[in-house]
Amino acid sequence: MLYPWQQSQWRQLQQAMQQQRLPHALLLTGPNGVGKRVFTDALARSLLCEQPDAKGLACGSCHSCKLLDAGNHPDFMLLKPAPPKTSKSDNPVLSIKIDAVRELIERLSTTSQMQGRRVAVIEQADKMAHAAANSLLKTLEEPGEDTVLILHSARPHLIPITIRSRCQKLAFPIPERRLALDWLQQQGVSDAENRLAQAHGAPLLAVDDEPSGKTVLDAAGREAVANAMLARARRQSALMYAAELAKLPKYPALSCCLDWVSDIIKLKTAADTPATLVNAAARQSIGVIAAQADSARLFRFYDGLCEAIRQESIALNPQLLWESLLISWDEV
Ligand SMILES: [Zn+2]
C-alpha cells in the first residue's frame, strides 16, 4: 500500500530499479505523519517479492511475500529503537544500540538465504547511538551483492554526516493540502481542515485512530493542553493542570503547547492582519489572552518551551517540568 502523495517517490525508485541503478543505501526523510514507514514497508516488499505487479508493488501471494507476512523472511532485517534493557521508566529513552547494529552487520556478512535480494530497514535512524552509527559505515558503503539498506528519519540532521553522505536521500515533504484533505475525507475524518491544521499538514497525525506512539496527542491529550493554555481566559490557574499534562507523552504535549503560544504571539503582534492559526476554532479566547499578555514574558515563555523541547529526551520528572512551565505561563 502507498498513500496518494507518495506516487512520485515510488515512480522514481521503480525507474531506478528498472535501470539497475537502485542505490544500495537509501535515507527517507520527512516529518512524522507523512507515511515514511508505510512507504518503506512497500519498498521492502517490492524488493523481495518474486513477481511484483506492473506498478512494482508486491504480489502478496508468492513464497517471499508470505514469509514476510509471517514475520520470518530470512533475508529481511528490521532495526528499530528500543528502551534500555534495565529501564523501569514508563517513558524510557529509546535508542538503537551498537549490539543490534553489529548483529545486523553479522547477518549481512553471510549470503542470501533465498538467492534473491536482501533488505535491511533501520527505523528512526537518528536514534542510533554514536558508536552504533560508526560501526555501520563500512556496511553502508559495501552492503554486499543485491542488498539494500533503507533508513528513515524525521530528524535527519541528528544523523552523523558520515552516514547521511553514504545514503541517497529521498524526501517526503508535507503533502499538498488538497491531496491530504481528500484522503482525510475518504477516511471519514470529520472536521478535516482543522485537524490537518493542528497536525501541521501531516495527514496521518490528523487521523484519530492512527497508532501514533509518542509522536502525537490524542483528542483527550489535546484538550488537556488546551485547558491549561486557555485557563486564564476562564480566570483559572494553569498550574492545576500540571498533573494531567505530566501523564501525556512529553514531546507532543510540549509541541502542542508551542502551537498555542505561537497562535497567541501571532494575534498579539499582528492583530490587524488575519493570521492563520493552528487552533483557529479558539480564535476568540486566544485573542483575549493575547490582549492581556506581556510581550516580553510571552517571548521568554516561548524560549523556555523551545528549550524544554530541545531537552525532551533528558529524563526529567514530568510533574516538576510542567509545574515550572505552568507557573511561568500563569505569570505571562
Ligand atoms: Zn510476492
Image: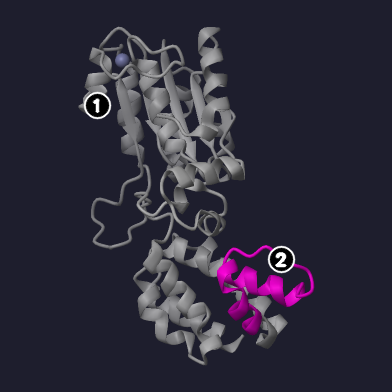
Left or right, residue 131 beside residue 6: left
Q: Do the residues labelled 1 and 2 touch (CB within 8 Å)?
A: no
Prevailing secondary structure of the magenta residues: helix
Q: Which of marks 1 and 2 is in front?
A: 2
Q: Which residue lies furthest to the right in this view?
A: 272
Residue under label 2: 275
The residue located at (56%, 40%) in the rendering is: 179
- Is residue 284 inside the magenta stretch? yes
- 197 relative to 205 in the view: left or right: right
Image-based side of 100 in relation to 40, left or right: left
| Placement of the N terminus among the 4 image quadrants | top left
Position of 4 with respect to 297 (left or right) is left
Give the secondary structure at mark 1: helix
Q: In which quarter of the image is residue 208?
A: bottom left
Residue labelled 1 has its Cβ within 8 Å of some atom of ligand 1: no
User: What distance separates the C-alpha of mark 1 from that of mark 2?
Assistant: 48 Å
- Type of amino acid at the residue the image marks with label 2: Ala
Closer to us: 34 or 21: 34
Relative to 217, residue 161 above or below: above
State the residue position of label 1.
Answer: 69
- Of residues 291 and 132, which is closer to you in this image? 291
Q: What stretch is highlighted in magenta?
A: 260-289
Mark 1: which amino acid? Answer: Asp
Using the rendered image of the protein, determine whether residue 185 is visible from the camera's viewpoint. yes
Q: Identify the residue at image location x=57%, y=20%.
A: 12
- Position of residue 95 relative to residue 323, above or below, is above
Q: Where is residue 322 in the image (x, y as percent from the top left)?
A: 44, 77
**Residue 145: x and y, percent?**
41, 10
Establish if 225 lies above or below 276.
below
